[in-house]
Amino acid sequence: MLDHVGFQCSDLARSAAFYDTVLAPFGGVRIMDFGQAIGYGVPPMPDFWISVFDSGDGFRESHIAFSAADTATVDAFFTAAVEAGAEVLHQPRLWPEYHPGYYGAFVRDPDGNNVEAVCHTAAG
């Protein structure tokens, strides 16, 4: 289970615009903004953070999956992400190789991270 997760971003403003758009289908909004770090979530507490890239060498792809209540939310995430310019990794579909009912969509965010929306209770 996640408490919070964060990504460092090469262009914080560009990434913030992306996440402002793609987290909306989940009810996710900016909760805290410190200029160098922005916290998102469903109020009252942020559980997803983006910040200015200021440490580490090179790039390491990160993966995060946002939990969706239903397949419509996965589809809405995917549409929002594509409209925000995300690279499509995998369009929304059932992934029975993961487990029955696993419905997910995968995109690449502005910094190259693998971002997923997943519903674990989709009808097959």
Image (tube, rainbow, N blue to C red):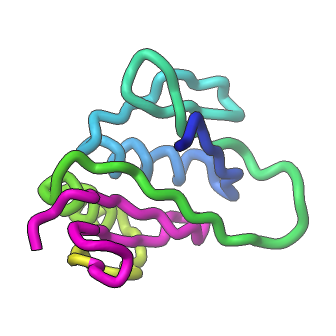
The image shows residue 7 at horizontal and vertical percentages of 65, 51
Residue 123, horizontal then vertical, whole percent:
10, 66
Report whether 105 appears left or right of 111: left
Percent of width and height locating residue 70: 17, 52
Q: Is residue 119 magenta?
A: yes
Location of the C terminus by quadrant is bottom left
- Left or right of 94, for residue 53: right
Provide the major secondary structure of the magenta segment. Answer: loop
Residue located farthest toward the front when viewing the structure as drawn: 100
Q: Is residue 117 left or right of residue 112?
A: left
Nearer the observer, 120 or 33: 120
Q: Residue at x 41, y 71 (%)?
A: 107
Q: Is residue 45 above or below residue 20?
A: above
Instruction: Tell me the magenta residue range.
Output: 95-124
Q: Residue at x 44, y 31 (%)?
A: 41
Query: Residue 24 or 67: which is nearer the viewer?
Result: 67
Q: Is residue 38 magenta?
A: no
Number of labels in the image equals 0
**Does residue 101 lie above or below 31 as drawn?**
below
Q: Between 117 and 28, which is closer to the camera in this rendering?
A: 117
> Can you name the residue that lies furthest to the top here?
44
User: Residue 101 lies in what quarter of the image?
Assistant: bottom left
The quadrant holding residue 51 is top right
Residue 38: horizontal and vertical position, in percent?
59, 33
The residue under the point 66% across, 24% down is 34
